[in-house]
Image: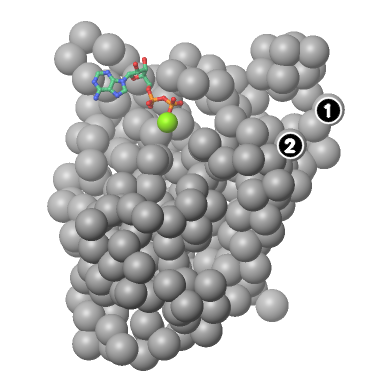
Amino acid sequence: MPISAPRLIVDGLSAGYGAVRALDQVSLSLEPGETVALLGTSGNGKSTLINTIMGLVPPRSGTIFLEENGVRTPLAGRRTESIADLGLALVPEGRRLFPRLTVEENLSLGAYRGAARGQRHERLAECFDAFPALKQRRRQLAGSMSGGEQQMLALARALMSAPRILLIDEPSVGLAPILVSRLIDTIAAMKARYRLSVLMAEQNFHQAVRIADRGYVLVQGRVAFVGRTADELRNSALVKTYYLGT
Ligand SMILES: Nc1ncnc2c1ncn2[C@@H]1O[C@H](COP(=O)(O)OP(=O)(O)O)[C@@H](O)[C@H]1O
Ligand SMILES: [Mg+2]
């Protein structure tokens, strides 16, 4: 059954920092209910793309919009709060938790989206239901938890805003392999539970492709390969030589 969510369309997007051109004419789409992997080694523009969608980096040219029932809502030029109000949420690179606040306080800060704010208590209860390990630790300081638990908290915090589209930036960074595998499973489970569309940047090709429907490979700020299925990604010559180094 198709889920009720907007399509996210990025068309001809360029962005950068001063003289650095980080994104060059990037086009991609995220359809309702999809998990799309954004692949590429370090420094190729994954975070810039995700942060530009979220309004944290200004685009230099190109368009970003949501499309639902034939209505297009442009995102470029909006503030991040307004983009969150439209149902997008970010799990940022490096997690960006408040280490000296408790688990519960970190989660409460995730409920700042207009529609979610009034339902903070319901969202928190639902969140603890989805992440029992966080409920046990609700009074613990975020900074005192393990890397895997912190990434779980960052994911849960993003869900507190009741998003329809979740952008996840390199969730596996700094985690032991067994935890990466568990986290990727959790992302897949949360995607199903909350009926989300997920755009996930990852350097861990094998783990990302395990749950991705399809994906894009970014090389030096450009889309160098479009894999229409996970198998197309696995079998891509570019992925094998350039990205996996085999
Ligand atoms: N805040 C910044 N200031 C200047 N250059 C940046 C900044 N952030 C990223 N870059 C540069 O932009 C390019 C893309 O970086 P990034 O989007 O972080 O890639 P990735 O997430 O794939 O590692 C790199 O050349 C990086 O050095
Ligand atoms: Mg990055």
Q: Report the disc number at residue 235.
A: 1
**Nearer to us: label 1 or label 2:** 2
Dot placed on the residue nearer the N-terminal end, 1 or 2: 2
Q: Amino acid at mark 1?
A: Asn
In the rendered view of the protein, which quadrant contains the N terminus? bottom right
Q: Residue at x 32, y 40 (%)?
A: 51
The picture quadrant where one finds residue 141 is bottom left
Residue 106 point in image, percent of width and height? 29, 65
Q: Amino acid at mark 2?
A: His
**Front in this rendered view, residue 223 or 166:** 166
Q: Residue at x 20, y 35 (%)?
A: 58
- Ligand 2 shows up in which quadrant of the image? top left
Q: Which residue is mark 2?
A: 206
Q: Report the disc number at residue 176.
A: none
Residue 155 point in image, percent of width and height? 45, 60
In the rendered view of the protein, which quadrant contains the C terminus? top right
Give the vertical position of 65 relative to 117 (above or below): above
Residue 115 in sight from this viewpoint: no
Residue 77 in sight from this viewpoint: yes
The picture quadrant where one finds residue 189 is bottom right
Give the vertical position of 101 relative to 75 (above or below): below
Q: Residue at x 23, y 42 (%)?
A: 56
Residue 164 point in image, percent of width and height? 44, 68
Q: Mark 1 falls on what kind of element?
A: helix
Q: Mark 2 falls on what kind of element?
A: helix
Residue 192 point in image, percent of width and height? 63, 71
